[in-house]
Amino acid sequence: MENITGYSAVAERLKGSDILKVANRLRDMIAQGQRVCNLSVGDFSPKEFQIPQTLKKLIIESYQNNETNYPPSYGTVELRKSVQDFYKRKFGLEYELDEIQITSGSRPVTHAFYSCTLDSNHTLLYPVPSWNNDLYAVLTQAKEICLLTKPENGFHPIREEIEPHIEKANVLALCSPSNPTGTMFTEKAIRGICELVLQENERRKGKQKPLYVLFDSVYWMLTFGKYTHYNPVVLYPDLKNYVVIVDGISKCFAATGVRVGWGLGPKHLISKMTHVIAHAGAWAPRAEQIAVSKYLYLDDDISQYITTLKSDIENRLNKLYQIMLNLSKKGHPVHAIEPQGAMYLSVQFNLFGKKTPEGTVLQSNNQIAEYLLEHAKLGIVPFQAFGYPEENGWFRLSVGAVGVQDIEWLCKELEKAIEKLHN
Ligand SMILES: Cc1ncc(COP(=O)(O)O)c(C=O)c1O
C-alpha cells in the first residue's frame, strides 16, 4: 500500500531506543511499589553519582553572571582553548582552535560527523554490539556493514575482520571503552586497525575519498586495573587527518544532563560539522561552556573526582562480576567478562531451552530478559538493542543507577530465579 502517513523514509525506519523500553517497564514496576535492580540505563542516577561540586559551583556562577545568550556555533573561545590545553596535557595532542567543535553533549558530534561524511551511496562500517551506530546509519540513509565481534576479543573488532570490507567503507566507527560491553581495545588490536586505516588512505590518495574514522572515547577516563586507554591519534599522529575524536563531560563527570561535549578532527571537516550543529541548534548552553572551560584546568580537582568516581563504579562492577562468577562456579550457564572500563558489564545468561515455572521454554534473549525481570526483578538490556543479531544470551548490565545494597539484594534474587528453571 502507498505510504499515506506523510513521513519521510528516515522517519518510517527510525525506531525508538530499545533500552528505554526496558527502563519504562522498570519504572512501572517501581510505581507499583516493587523493588527492582535497574541495570538497564547508561545514565547516572544523581542519588548515586553527582557531578563534581566545583563544576556545579562554576555553572551556578555563570548563570549569576548572566551568561545566557547564544554561544558561537563552534563553541566559546574559552572552552575550545580549554579543551585544546586539556588534550595537550592529557594526551600530548596538538589541535588548533578551528579543529575543535563544542556541542550539546557528545551525541551531536557523532551526528554532525556522519551527516558530513555519509551519503546514501556511502558505507558505514561498524562493529556490533555498539552504541547507536545502527540508528545513525538510518538517519544518514547510508549503506551499512556490521562486523559481528567475538567475546574472546572483548567484542571489539580486529584488523583481520575489518580488512575484507575496508575498500568499500567511507567511515569506520570505533569506540573504547565500549558501550555496551565495558571492554577496551588492547594496544595490539587498536594498532592493527590504525595501521590498516593508514594503509588504506595511502592507497586512496588522489584517487578516492578518504576513509574517515569516528573514535568515540566518551568513557576514556573510566578505566580499571591493568586496562589502559589508547587513542589512535596518539599512537599514529598521521591519523589526525582522518579521525574525529568524540568526547565530553557526560560520562567521565557523571554529567549526562548538563550537555557539554566536543569533537576534535581535521579543520575542513570540523568547519562543515559546525554548519550542521548551527542549523540543529545543538550547541551547549553558554553558561555550562564557561563553567566547563574553567573546570578543565583544575587537574587536582579532576583527578580527585575521577579517583572516587572510578572506585565507586568499579566496586559495583566487581560485585556484579563476582555474583556471575559464583553462579558459574555453581554450574549455572552464566559467563561474564572482567570489568575493564566505562560503567558496564557484559554477561551471558545462556538459559536457552530452560523451562520456566510457568511452562515457557526460553528461546530468545528477550524471553530471558523478561524472565529475569519478572522473577529476579532485574532490568538488563540484550545486545540486540546494540545492533547485535545473534540470540546467544549476551546482555549489558549498567551500574550507573544502582547502589551497592541493590546489587547485594539482587545476588539472592538472581540465584533463586535461575534455580527455579528446569531442563
Ligand atoms: C559510547 C557513547 N558515545 C556517546 C554517548 C552520548 O553521550 P552524550 O550524552 O554526551 O550525548 C553515549 C551515551 O550513552 C555513549 O555511550
Image: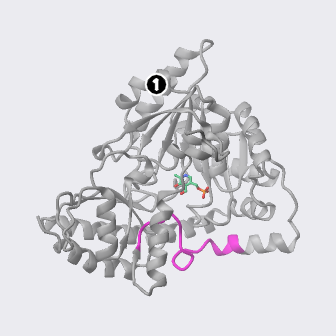
**Which residue type does callout 1 highlight?**
Ile
Q: Residue at x 81, y 69 (%)?
A: 62
In which quadrant is the N terminus drawn?
Answer: top right
- The answer to whether residue 227 of the structure is visible from this angle is no
Q: Is residue 51 above or below residue 14?
A: below
In which quadrant is the C terminus drawn?
Answer: bottom left
Q: Main secondary structure of the magenta part?
A: loop
Q: For the residue with label 1, is its CB less than 8 Å from the closest atom of ligand 1?
A: no
Residue 165 part of the magenta segment: no
Q: Residue at x 58, y 74 (%)?
A: 50
Disc 1: which residue = 166
Q: Is residue 239 left or right of residue 94?
A: left
Give the image quadrant in which the ligand numbered 1 is located: bottom right
User: Percent position (x, y) of residue 77?
Assistant: 82, 50
User: Percent position (x, y) of residue 188?
Assistant: 37, 37
Q: Residue at x 27, y 69 (%)?
A: 322
Q: Is residue 196 above or below residue 158?
A: above
Query: Dividing the picture into quarters, in which one does residue 53 lie?
Result: bottom right
Query: Dividing the picture into quarters, in which one does residue 375 lie?
Result: bottom left
- The region drawn magenta spans 38-56
Query: Dividing the picture into quarters, in which one does residue 252 lie?
Result: bottom right
Q: Is residue 144 above or below residue 363?
A: above
Q: Residue at x 20, y 71 (%)?
A: 418
SS for callout 1: helix
Q: Is residue 141 left or right of residue 74?
A: left
Q: Is residue 389 left or right of residue 64?
A: left
User: Percent position (x, y) of residue 28?
Assistant: 47, 77
- For label 1, the crowd category at 10 Å Cα-Cα, with few meaning under 14, some 14 to 19 and many 20 or more, is some
